[in-house]
Amino acid sequence: MESKDIILKLEKNGLVFESLFKNITEEQISWKANENKWSMLEIVCHLLDEEKEDFRQRIDFTLNNPGEAWPAIDPQGWVRSRNYSGKNFDETLNQFLAERKKSIEWLYNLSNPNWQVCYLHPKAGEVSAEQLLANWIAHDLLHIRQITATNYAYLLYKTSPIKLDYAGKW
């Protein structure tokens, strides 16, 4: 897959996220299937933080400062330390969508990037800028799946005891 194709997919995924997050109820914003699952609010907060502090920033470091250590991230810990559950959903969603647009603009404006340049990660080994770019899409897809699963679990919760197997096996 060429970098321009990946960037275009990231751009289109911004529209997918916007569509998935629009028109959900206030109850659904903070609803969780169980204590180990994330709410829609926590998901969008995570997406915002990852957009700013993981993929874009780490690709930038890898391309422009390949020997420098990446800034630390703590996606699981941020849920509590950054009080995701206390954030405003609409504001966070709008911030995420704006950051995604900034990311896309930044990616399109890179001047002849060397996607093969690598960062030596202490646990993952060599990670190329190209690998980070591809994993950015993978990250999107994981969370699109998570949002869909959360929507399905919420539907089960709201329609219980109605069976949903007529629609097909989940």
Image (cartoon, helix red, strand yellow):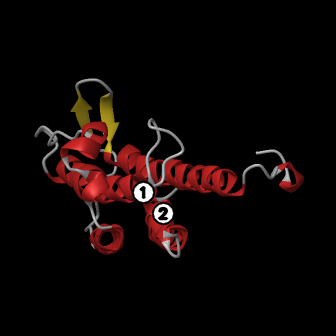
Could you tell me if residue 114 is visible in this image? no
Q: Position of residue 26 (x, y in %)?
A: 45, 68
What is the C-alpha distance between the residues marked 2 and 1?
Answer: 6 Å
Image-quadrant location for residue 92: bottom left
Mark 2 surroundings: few (<14), some (14-19) or many (≥20) residues within 10 A: few
Q: Quadrant of the C terminus?
A: top right
Which secondary structure, mark 2? helix
State the residue at coordinates (26%, 67%).
110
Q: Amino acid at mark 2?
A: Glu
Q: Quadrant of residue 147?
A: bottom right
Q: Residues within 10 Å of mark 1 (few under 14, many from 20)?
A: some
Kind of residue at badge 1:
Ser
Measured from the top left, where is residue 35 in percent x and y? 44, 37
Which is nearer the eye, 51 or 9?
Answer: 51
| Residue 30 numbered tag | 1
Image point (54%, 49%), residue name: 146
Q: Is residue 111 above or below residue 3?
A: below
Asked if labels 1 and 2 touch by Cβ distance under 8 angstroms, the answer is: yes
Left or right? Give the position of 38 relative to 67.
right
Q: Position of residue 105 (x, y in %)?
A: 31, 75
Residue pointed to by mark 2: 27
